[in-house]
Amino acid sequence: MQISNVTKQPKRSPFLDFFWRWIGVFPFFIFISVFLILPSLNLFSGAFKDTQGNFTFDNISAVANPYVLKSISVSLRVSAITSLVGGVFGFFVAYAITIGKAPKWMRNFLTTFSGLAANFGGVPLAFAFIATLGRTGFITAIFKGICFTNSAGIQVCPLNLYDHGFNLYSVTGLVLAYTYFQFPLMILTIIPALDGLKKEWREASDSLGANQWHYWTKVAFPILLPSILGAMLLLFSSAFGAYATAQALTGGSIYLITILIGQQIRGDVLNNPHEGYALALIMILIMAVTILGYSILQKRTSRWLKL
């Protein structure tokens, strides 16, 4: 009779199995708990408290104040304009470097630039625009120096931007600054969708007698539409939540919802942190609706990309 020399392995504890399986994500859970979940709970509870810590709905009802409604309206308008302008401009640039006949080096250059420009915001972006298009910016100075004398002997400077109503420190300047990082973000977001258009679909439409206009209106654009709208919603969220660029560029003279929240919490102009919490809660709800719409559109897009 042969005796087996195989030794039985000791049975591992289920707790140790669970620990070693999830140890890699523990730092992530700790991070989001400290910097996301706990602050969100504090914000939610603080929105329904007064300065003495008593429960109240006054902070939520303060949203109906004219200055709050104006700040929300301006934020929505700036976000909508920049998402539309950046989305359209970014889509055509992405089309040129994917489906168009742009050289390969152009695609590499633009994708690298987009990766940098999409994350270039805040105070550095505001300073760059002030140094470029401010009242003493170098582009403004160049245009101001292009002058001529008309027939009446009066010196005219037709390219002086500020003589024609332009003001960098206004909503127009803010839209211009936001567009700088909006269209590169659109390029990075829409390139995968454009690459997902299969050659077989174009060949099938050509075999059925469709021209380029029919292909884009009946095949390509309906497929790309959820991706385009989803990318624009992403741009909308990016602009709606921006704070540092607007604060540094305008000095808080334009009332955006983010600037108003900062003033309430810091107390430099206003001083009601709990009302700031309530405004932040309203802002989070708007952002949540936007992100939900983006997720729904992305699911519709993924059906075509999996084919």
Image: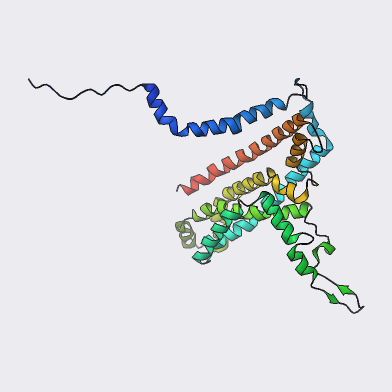
Q: Is residue 277 above or below residue 258?
A: above
Spot occupied by residue 269 in the image (x, y as percentages of width and height): 82, 38
- Residue 7 appears anywhere in the view: yes
In the rendering, at what x and y percent does residue 173 appear?
A: 75, 55
Q: Quadrant of residue 40?
A: top right
Q: Is residue 158 left or right of residue 197?
A: right
| Residue 165 quadrant | bottom right
Seen from the viewer's position, the closer of residues 36 and 214 is: 36
Q: Residue furthest right?
A: 152
Q: Relative to the observer, which residue lies in front, 153 or 83?
A: 153
Quadrant for the N terminus in the image: top left
Q: Is residue 29 left or right of residue 183?
A: left
Q: Residue at 56% x, 60% y: name it.
A: 110
Task: Evaluate whether residue 99 shows in this view.
Answer: no
> Which colouring convention does the figure follow?
rainbow
Query: Compared with residue 260, is residue 56 higher up or lower down, i.e. above or below?
Result: above
In the image, 35 versus 58, the foreground residue is 35
Q: Position of residue 306 (x, y in %)?
A: 45, 47
**Count of all numbered marks drawn on residues in the image:** 0
Residue in the picture at 74% in, 65% down: 138
- Above or below, 151 against 90 in this view is below
- Of all residues, the one furthest to the bottom in this rendering is 151
The image shows residue 214 at horizontal and vertical percentages of 56, 60
- Name which residue lies at 37% across and 26% down: 17
- The one of 97 and 113 positioned closer to us in this rendering: 113
